[in-house]
Image: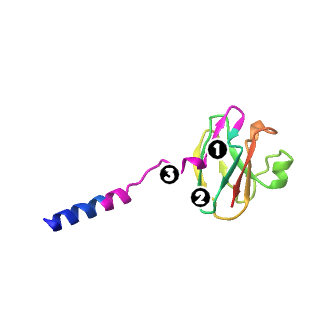
Amino acid sequence: MKNQILIASLMLVFFSCSKESNEPSNTENIIRTSGLNFVPSTLNCNIGDTIFFELGGTHNAIEVSEETYNSSSSTPLENGFIFDFGSSGYIVANELKTYYYVCTPHLPNMKARIVVN
């Protein structure tokens, strides 16, 4: 009987730990679009965090340099992230830096940043 309980417990642990999900585990790291804004406009997170993007159909998100961000331009950052109009996806904050990004058709107002601590 003890062996059956042990096996059942191990199976429960295995299946609950190996369950895959497409839902973000940290709801604080979700960037959405609302009107002509990214929400939040500044996301503070930690290195190693996953940041999820959920964009409306008329919005994209293009990572740009700080200079491009400050000049409200949309030249993509080489090797930066790009999320197409209406797409969803994620990045992993794998370095201590600030990620700057814009919505190309809604500049100069629609821009935001991710600050990684």
Image side of residue 87 versus residue 66, left or right: left
Residue 71: x, y in percent?
87, 47
What amino acid does circle 2 point to? Asp
Instruction: Name the residue at 69% across, 40% down.
Output: 38
Residue 59: x, y in percent?
67, 38
Image side of residue 17 versus residue 25, left or right: left
Give the distance between the C-alpha atoms of the residues marked 2 and 3, in whole angstroms: 10 Å
Q: Which quadrant of the view contains residue 115?
A: bottom right
Instruction: Name the residue at 38% across, 55% down.
Output: 19
Decide which of tag 1 and tag 3 comes sooner along the chain. 3
Q: Which residue is more in the foreground, 79 or 27?
A: 27
Label 3, secondary structure: give it. Answer: loop
Q: Which residue is mark 2?
A: 49
Instruction: Name the residue at 79% across, 50% down.
Output: 75
Mark 2 neighbour class, 10 Å CA radius: few under 14, some 14 to 19, many 20 or more: some
Whether 22 is drawn above or below 12: the answer is above
Q: Which mark is residue 25?
A: 3
Mark 1 neighbour class, 10 Å CA radius: few under 14, some 14 to 19, many 20 or more: some
User: What's the magenta region?
Assistant: 13-37
Q: Which residue is more in the foreground, 85 or 56?
A: 56
Label 2, secondary structure: give it. Answer: loop
Give the distance between the C-alpha atoms of the residues marked 2 and 1, in whole angstroms: 22 Å
What amino acid does circle 3 point to? Ser
